[in-house]
Image (cartoon, rainbow, N blue to C red):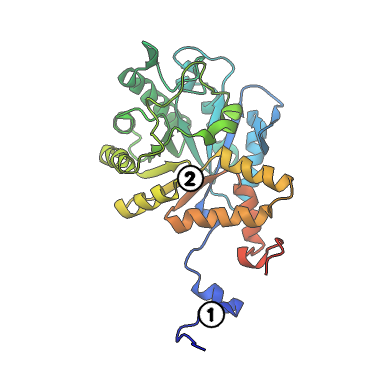
């Protein structure tokens, strides 16, 4: 019988050696927790398609953000549900809009927490699209002015970072210029550089109440079949001044995360989107998977692909498991040998 000179099981045989040579590590410092802030008081409405995730009024956002921070999650990203919506999404850039007031409350009551804001119009427009509509489609250049105003209003309210998700051409430059010209040159921009027109966003649209009232977003979000275009999109954002580039969704686009890691020396973020989260939750509720194990394996896949930061609705769960010293390979209840 032939015996190979190299035997992988020599290292795998002892936990101490497995830990010593593990190539990919996950930390609470990698996590960003998305939160949905709703206008009003006493609101804590669970998203039916996203168990454990809520639309919340500001006082409840603050309480949960404090909980996440105490678990070691260093940052949240905010999405807003305003009191009213209109054709130009005016609450998005209002001085006392829902996100602006949420930022102020968080910075006052959880000062150590980094507050990142999603910069887009879809949650604030009555038509659900990501900008101003002209001739049945989003007017790219007219929308840039509103996105820039929105980003500036977030910085003025105390945001630590802004994250444009709209996919308008030129929006990173527009935001960088307005921030720099108004004394916020130190505010970084995390660009949703590569955002695909994906079917994985369904639960989010319930959470953010942002379903388009007509058509779809394929004229401005990327075609799922395109890889080289992703590099071009990211390159434009880097040249315009992005500090972090993001890929969204995550799991179906791990190859694109690796493309970003190979092509650029900036930090790379990945958004573990609502549909990915909900699929794990649904399968776990049916007893088909080990939820803890699959969640942690998913997080490791993002890191292994090259992501530095993970935006995930699992952030608090992951932080708790990390505190317990959870190891994916040792905590299987699947019955496998």
- Which quarter of the rendering shows the C terminus? bottom right
Secondary structure under badge 2? helix
Mark 2–mark 1 distance (CA, rounded to whole Å): 31 Å
- The residue located at (59%, 53%) in the rendering is 72
Tag 2: Cα neighbours inside 10 Å, few (<14), some, or many (≥20)? few
Residue 11: which numbered mark, if any? Answer: 1
User: What SS does tag 1 mark?
Assistant: helix
Q: Going by the picture, which residue comes out furthest to the front?
A: 1
For image coordinates 47% across by 67% down, the residue present is 23
Q: Is residue 71 visible?
A: no
Q: What label does residue 314 carry, if any? A: none
x, y percent for residue 334:
70, 61
Q: Position of residue 129 (x, y in %)?
A: 46, 20
| Residue 258: percent from left, percent from top | 38, 53
| Vertical arrangement, residue 265 with respect to residue 60, above or below | below
Q: Is residue 108 above or below residue 262?
A: above
Q: Give x and y (percent) for residue 40.
A: 65, 22
Q: Is residue 186 visible?
A: yes
Which of the 4 image quarters holds residue 41?
top right
Q: Residue at x 63, y 35 (%)?
A: 61
> How many marks on residues?
2
Up the image or down, 291 lies above or below 177; here it is: below
Q: Residue furthest left?
A: 239
Labels 2 and 1: the sequence-earlier one: 1
Estimate how packed mark 1 is, as few (under 14), some (14 to 19) or many (20 or more) residues with alpha carbons within 10 Å: some
Q: Which residue is mark 2?
A: 252
């Amino acid at each position: 019988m032939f015996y190979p000179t190299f035997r992988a099981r020599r290292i795998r045989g002892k936990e101490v050696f497995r830990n010593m040579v593990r190539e990919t590590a996950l930390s609470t410092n990698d996590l960003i927790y998305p939160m949905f802030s709703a206008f009003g008081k006493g609101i804590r409405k669970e998203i039916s398609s996203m168990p454990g995730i809520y639309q919340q009024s500001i006082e409840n956002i603050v309480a949960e953000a404090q909980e996440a921070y105490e678990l070691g999650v260093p940052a949240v990203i905010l999405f807003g549900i305003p009191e009213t919506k209109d054709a130009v999404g005016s609450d998005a850039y209002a001085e006392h809009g829902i996100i602006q007031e949420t930022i102020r409350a968080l910075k006052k009551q959880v000062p150590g927490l980094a507050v990142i804001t999603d910069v887009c119009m879809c949650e604030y427009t009555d038509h659900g699209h990501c900008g101003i509509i002209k001739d049945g489609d989003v007017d790219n250049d007219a929308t840039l002015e509103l996105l820039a105003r929105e980003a500036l209003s977030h910085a003025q309210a105390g945001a630590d970072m802004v994250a444009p998700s709209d996919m308008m051409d030129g929006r990173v430059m527009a935001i960088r210029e307005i921030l720099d010209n108004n004394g916020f040159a130190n505010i970084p921009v995390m660009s949703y550089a590569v955002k695909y027109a994906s079917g994985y966003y369904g639960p989010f649209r319930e959470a953010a109440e942002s379903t388009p009232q007509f058509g779809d977003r394929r004229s401005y979000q990327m075609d799922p079949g395109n890889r080289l275009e992703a590099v071009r999109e990211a390159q434009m954002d880097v040249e315009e001044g992005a500090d972090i580039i993001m890929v969204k969704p995550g799991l179906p686009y791990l190859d694109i995360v690796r493309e970003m890691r190979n092509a650029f020396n900036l930090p790379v973020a990945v958004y573990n989107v609502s549909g990915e989260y909900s699929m794990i939750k649904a399968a776990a509720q049916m007893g088909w998977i080990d939820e803890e194990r699959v969640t942690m394996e998913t997080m490791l896949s993002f890191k292994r692909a090259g992501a530095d930061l993970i935006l995930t609705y699992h952030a608090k769960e992951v932080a708790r498991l990390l505190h317990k010293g959870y190891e994916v390979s040792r905590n299987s209840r699947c019955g496998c040998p």
